[in-house]
Amino acid sequence: MGKGGSLSDGVIKKILLSYSYVAIWIFLSFTVIVYNKYILDKKMYNWPFPISLTMIHMSFCATLAFLLIKVFKVVEPVSMSREVYLSSVVPIGALYSLSLWLSNSAYIYLSVSFIQMLKALMPVAVYSIGVLFKKEGFKTDTMVNMLSISFGVAIAAYGEARFDTWGVILQLGAVAFEATRLVMIQILLTSKGITLNPITSLYYVAPCCFVFLLVPWIFVELPVLRETSSFHFDFFIFGTNSLCAFALNLAVFLLVGKTSALTMNVAGVVKDWLLIAFSWSVIKDTVTPINLVGYGLAFLGVAYYNHSKLQALKAKEAQKKTAQADEEAGRLLEERESEGNDKKSESQS
């Protein structure tokens, strides 16, 4: 009874911890999105400089990652040659900088709710680019599912009250670059046996992002910032915003490390619905019935995609266990045959 009770307590504790990690990730992801919208939107804090904001995030995160790895030695660094860094990390950093720049720029033109609806296209982009680079096999049923997600997002876009073509182009570009980055991580890092957690990722990638963003910043935003003489850097606003962005990376590490990537995908769906509700009720963005119908269709497609991925993972794990069991059985059989041969040779002698 006592043993059963302790086991039950352990299971309950594990479940509660998993839900805690999910709640922390949802809260921080929610906070970063709303905070970025607040800073960049011309009707709120009115600081429409997405490149500058992204560079502040990257410099803050790179500094903290350096301190955690090199000074406090909380996280072990990953050994990496200059050749691997230049051929693998730098391209990923370039894609990440473009993704962040465009996604932050979209907040100036689009509502938070509509941006979340457009982000439902991420599985479509990842799968399509994966097929293009031969990291995913083409499957008709999966492609039909991807088309259903796209159709749902198209309906949501049709029903958008504040549709802005440039904002949509920016957000779709951000999705495309982010999807390419995720596929490139598999091709350039994972295939070489290099695994980076969010802290080591920031340590290596954030400085790259900063350098890549520096070039467009000099030509696009620096001249405007020089003319805006009334602006004073608010350390509290930008400091807490950057801290939230860094904490979100830690939360991703906790959530994926202690649960699974699939749990994060499911939690992302919950976060998206919460953001849509918040955008409608607090920010007073217009969410139309057509918006909800379209996003509902896309949501069903994404849910089915996640379910299919889970089934594929379970099937792969079952095959792996079967192969291990067969290997173990074969090894035991060889040992018994060897023992039998030894006894036979002993009796003959």
Image (tube, rainbow, N blue to C red):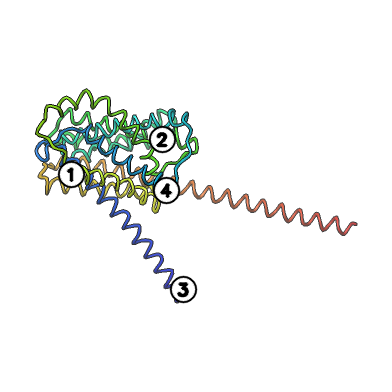
Residue 66: x and y, percent?
37, 42
| Occupied quadrant, residue 44 | top left
Disc 3 crowd, CA 10 A, few/some/many (<14, 14-19, 20+)? few
Q: Are marks 1 and 3 in contact (CB under 8 Å)?
A: no
The numbered mark, 1 or 4, whose residue comes first in the sequence reads 4
Location of mark 4 (residue): 73
The local crowd at label 1, few if under 14, some if 14 to 19, many if 20 or more residues have their Cα within 10 Å, is few
Q: Give the alpha-carbon distance from disc 2 to disc 4, as whole Å.
A: 25 Å
- Which of pointers 2 and 1 lies earlier in the amino acid sequence? 2
Residue at (85% x, 55% y) in the render: 345
**Residue 264: image location, x then y, percent:** 34, 48
Q: Earlier in the sequence, mark 3 or mark 4?
A: 3
The amino acid marked with disc number 3 is Lys
Q: Nearer the viewer, residue 254 or 222?
A: 222
Is mark 2 in CB contact (under 8 Å) with mark 1? Answer: no
The front one of 332 and 275 is: 275
- Image quarter of the C terminus: bottom right
Residue under numbered circle 1: 237
246 lies left or right of 334:
left
Secondary structure found at label 3:
helix
Q: Which residue is mark 2?
A: 185
Q: Nearer the viewer, mark 2 or mark 1?
A: 1
Nearest to N terminus: mark 2 or mark 4: 4
Q: Amino acid at mark 2?
A: Ile
